[in-house]
Structures are given as structure tokens and as C-alpha cells.
Amino acid sequence: MGNFFQTRVIVSIFSAGIRLATPYLLASIGEMLDQRSGVYNLGIEGIMLIGAFLSFYTSLKTGSLMLGILMAIIVGLLMGLLSAFINVTMKAEQGISGIGIYMFGFGLSGLLFRLTMGAIVTIDGFKSTPIPILSKMPYIGEIFFNQNWMVYLAFLLVPISYIVLFKTTFGLKIRSVGENPSAADSLGVSVEFVRYVCIIIGSVLAALAGAFLTIGQQKAIFVENISAGRGFIAIALVYFGRWQPTGVMIGSLLFSILDALQIRVQIANIGIPYEYAVMAPYIITIIVLVFVAQHRIGGPTALGKPFERCK
Amino acid sequence: MKIRKNAFFISIITNILIPLGAVFLALIVGSIFLITAHVNPLNAYYLMFAASFGSLYGITETLVKATPLIIVGAGVCVAFRSGMVNIGGEGQIIVGAILTTFVALKLPSLPKIISVMILLLVGFVGGGIYGLIPGVLKAYFNINEILTTVMLNSIATQVLYLLLRGPMMDPLEKAFGTGYPQSSIIPQSAWLTRFFQGKRLHTGIFIAIILAIAMYYLLWKTTIGYKMRAVGKNKNASRYGGINVERYMILSMLIAGGMAGIAGAVEVMGIHHRLLDGISAGYGFSGIVAALFGKLNPLGTIPASILFGSILFGADSLQRTVGIPAAMVYAIEGLVVVFAVSGEIISRKIASRNTEILTEDEK
């Protein structure tokens, strides 16, 4: 307990916190795009799981981590296409279809894992690539600039998604389709097309978030249900961040630092049962949702409503 | 005359053909995975079917699996009809089972019928309170109930582990140092009677069917049920019509949670006779599938649950005989959900075409 607050420990907690923010950020930035276009994509947890397994398995078999990443992108594309077809073309009830996708992903990743590997295997995942000069700064360098490229990519997505959403024509289309699809439609915007693109991007990012959970770690490993609800937490983070890229980033950081602390507490073994540590993020998510709801800021107006053109 | 005939065909298509088509499509997609795993899908599906229906043991085990599905599914129907998506069955089952076991272990020796009644009520209260939380959060804070119920599922699982490794662990396990996470056995007066020697089928199946009928009655024959369905159809119109929308949203989650809690109680009293981890085995999710499949009608949930019970048992035996992981069931169930909700648009289209015919006839 005494050395718990040493600088070295604090630096390592924050460094881990930045790293652990990556899956939340990737998944929630993608989910934010989905919801901005008016579609809940509640299946991202399932997509994360399939992405996590197939990227790991591909890397294991081919020895190439980049092929694993490529596989995650393909998985994301295919699952995104499926989700978009169900939610946009078939106009399914989004809450339920999302749960279907989650169950499918949960089952399929478990099935494939048992069929192909069955036992837990570790491989070397992505190593950190320190950014020259910046990584030499005391403390700050270790925390922010000594991570692997997926971490940098995730944080880069924050300004990128901001620019796309608020400074480009396509971003304007996304927002209009989420707020008032009929008006957007009458102006010649293809509601279907915009929603397809958003769902597919969101799914690719979710699959990459899954890939990060396995091959994004120095010691890459796959276990069943490796995402452990992070996909659902990512959805909650979109609410927390009020559909804004910076808000989503703050939420992701809050959660990941909590995650890092939780792991630290488990290792330090200060007599708190492990179950409390596992429970904490879920309880905090609910509290956060209540807190956010108090401010009465709703999401995109057309969120969750399939678009039906008036005849 | 022509109209009635159309309506009959429509109900056949929407109630039977679309759900069966969804299962069929899911099995086809499932067979792709089986082929890639070098398993003959026709053989695997045949083995599954034969295991579930080919023997008395198979049939009884199918019904054993169907029992909690019927109870959870009938509750899910009430929630869905009131516009609430209850994904929290898993957590509600666990809380119901925890509370039931706790009370059963404290209960003095009473006649079986009385202790069973008390414990069913206890299960309802446990699950109901757990369903109440997302209900209240949705009604008064407008927090997406899908997110909260999923979170509450994970919390309940951890609470179960905490209790089983701590205060509720069987003293014998502690004494012998085996430390297996399970509670003591509940007294025999709280066990549900079994029908056959050596088979696990118990009177819970009757409890399940009675509860499903009760839920049907509640939804379609009472004022409360009418108001719930009105809220589910259109909140604003209901509010304008003087219905306290929040009250019925919360009530529907209380009932859905309570039903799942009863399912947990029945699992404890009928099958395991104690609390253990994995008490639910995914019944919370499968119950949703059964409810959707039964077209959100508690009575339709009964045959749907028997179908999914057979799939669950078939998958278990496939794992034992051919070595295909039972995780396959989740993948197939997920696909069934996806295809079933996607098929809704087809029935909607057919229905709208039919109303056009109707108006033409009226001309």
C-alpha cells in the first residue's frame, strides 16, 4: 500500500490508461457516427468479439500482425454490411436486431475459438513505437508518446471525426439524416446510402477495437468473451459524450484510467474481492448514464427510427 | 369472403412461415460454419433432432430446458408489448435464484405446496426488483433500458460469484476445503416433484404453462394489459388518452423481471436444489428469442420455447457426441433473431397490400 502512490506507479497507471482507452475510443467514435446518422448499432460488442478472434487467429497462423488487422477490417466490412442491410434496408427494430448481432458474434467467436484452438495461446502483439523526441520528455513522454500505433490512430480519430462531422458536406449529410431524414431526402440526400456508410465505418472501427484487445497488446491472447461488455460501455460513452468527439474521448479516458486503476488494485491485492473490481465499471456506467440524463440532452432526433419515405 | 381468406393466409405467413423461414435460414448459415469445421451439417442437425425427440430422456430434457424459456419468454412478451426491451433476463434469473435459495435455506419445514408457493413469490420479488431498476431509469430519466439491463446482467453475475465464494458457500465445501462455488442444498420440502425416476422433468413445466396463460390473460383480457399495449403502441397517444405512461412502463418491467425471477426459482427448486454459478445458462437471452419467435404472444412462446429447448439440448448432446461446441447455439439463435426481425417488413408489406385490397372492395 505504501508504494502505491509513487510517481513511477502513477506514470504506469496513466500510461496504461491511455493504452486501455483505445478500444473504447475506436468503438465509441464509430458508434457515434452510427447514431449521428440515426441508427443504433447495438451489435458492436459482437462485432468486436469476431474481430478480436479472427485478427488473432490470422496473426497466429500467418505470423503477420498486419494481416490480422486486414482481417479485422474485412470482418468489420462484412458485419457492417449485414447490420446495415438488416437495419436500413429491412427496417428491422434496431434494439432487437442489435442484440441478435451481439449473440451471433458472441456465439461465433466462441465456436470458432473452440473449434480451431481450444486452448489459450499467446503470441507477440504490436510493440510500442516511441515517437522520436516527444517520447523523451519526462513522464509525459512515457504516458503519451511511448504507445503502439493503434493507440495513436484511435486518438487521431477524435480530430478526424470532428472535421468529418462538422466541416465537410458528408458530415452535414450525416447529421441531417440523423435529425430529419425526410427533409434530407427531399433535398436529394440518399438516407440509405449515408446510413450504410456510417454503419460500415462504425463496424470496421468496432472490429479494430476487438483486434486491439488481442494483437494490440504486447502479449496477444484470445479468451472467450474477451471484450467483456466493453462494446456496451462504448455505446454508453456515446451518450456520456453527448454525441461529440471530444466528449466521447473524455469518457473513454475516464473509463480506461478506472480500468487501469482496477487492474492495479487487483495486482496490489489489498483485500478487495476481485468481483468488486469487475463490477465497478458497470455500476459506474449506470451512474454516468443517470448523470448524463439529468442534463436532458437528447441524441439525434431520428435515432432508432427506420426511415420510411412518405408516399 | 375473399377478405377473410386473405387475412387467414396473412396470419399463416406472418405467424408461421416467417419464423420458420428465419430458423431455416439460420440453420443454413450455421451449416456453412459446420462445413468449414469439417462437420457434415445434415448429419449434425439430424443428430440434434434425434437427441431431442428420439427418446423419452431426450423429450424430458427438452421440456426441462423449455421450462425456464417459457417463463422468461412470457415475461419478455409483457415488456415488449409495453414498448420495453428487456435484455435483463439473465440478471433477473440470477437475482431470483439467489433470493429463493437464501429464503429456502431459512425456511422452516412446511408442507411442500406452501413452501413452493412462498418461494415462487420470493423469486418474483427478487427478479421484479431487479427489473424495476431499468424500468424506473427508463420512465423517469429516459435512459436506454437495453444498456442498463445489459450492465445489470454483468453486475448480477459478479454478485453471484461473490456470494458463492463468500457468505453463501456450502459450509461442507469450506470444511473439506474443496471450495467449489455452490450453496448448501435446500430442504426437500422445497423441491419440485419429478415425474419419472432418473429423469429431471419436474412440475415446473406446469407452473410455466400456467404463468404463460396468466400473462396472455393479463395482456388481452384485462384493463391493465390493454393500457400496457396502448403504451407500447404509441406513448404520446396513450398519454393524451389519460394513461399514466410511466407507471405502465415500470409495471411491465416489474412483471417481466419477476417472471425471470420465477424462472430462477424454478431452476433452483426443480433442477439443481441449490445455488451454483451458471444457474442460468443463457436462458435470459434464449427466452427473448423464444418470445420473439412466439410473435410476442405468451401462448405462442410455449411451442417456441419447446423448439428452442430442443435446440439447446440437441446442442449439448452434439458437444458430448461429436464435439461441436455448444456455443454454436448462441450463433444460431442470434441469426434467428436477426432474420426474424428482418422478416417483419415482409409481413408489414403484405398486410398493407391487403388493406389496399380491402379499400378497393369497399369501393
Image (cartoon, coloured by chain):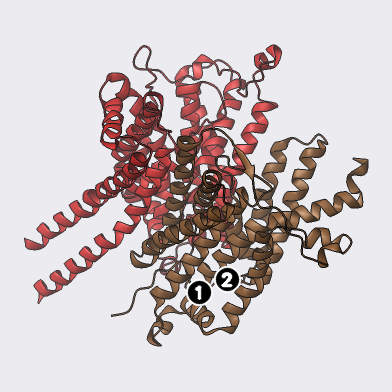
Chain colours: A brown, B red
- The answer to which quarter of the image holds residue B308 is top left
Residue B126, how many percent across, how many down?
A: 56, 37
Q: Which residue is mark 1?
A: A301
Residue B160, how many percent across, how many down?
A: 62, 33
Residue A199, how many percent across, how many down?
A: 47, 66
Image mark 2: chain: A
Residue lying at 38% horizontally and 17% vertically, measured from the top left: B194
- The image shows a total of numbered marks equal to 2
Query: Which residue type carries mark 1?
Result: Thr
User: Residue A254 versus residue B187: which sits nearer the camera?
Assistant: A254
Rounded to the nearest angstrom, the CA distance separating label 1 from label 2 is: 7 Å
Residue lying at 21% horizontally and 50% vertically, measured from the top left: B17
Rendered view: B42 above or below A234: above
Is the residue marked by circle 2 packed among few (<14), some (14-19), or many (20+) residues within 10 Å?
few
Residue lying at 14% horizontally and 69% vertically, measured from the top left: B358
Rendered view: A289 above or below A229: below
| Residue lying farthest to the front in this orientation | A63
User: Residue B227 versus residue A66: which sits nearer the camera?
Assistant: A66
Q: In this rendering, would A39 be left or right of A244? A: left
Residue A127, how many percent across, how many down?
A: 70, 53
Q: In this rendering, would B357 be left or right of A68? A: left
SS label for mark 1: loop
SS label for mark 2: loop
Q: Is residue A295 visible?
A: no
Q: Which residue is mark 2?
A: A298
Query: Which residue type carries mark 2?
Result: Gly
Tag 1 near tag 2, CB within 8 Å? yes
User: Residue A243 versus residue B322: which sits nearer the camera?
Assistant: B322
| Residue lying farthest to the left in this orientation | B1
User: Residue A57 versus residue A234: which sits nearer the camera?
Assistant: A57
Image mark 1: chain: A
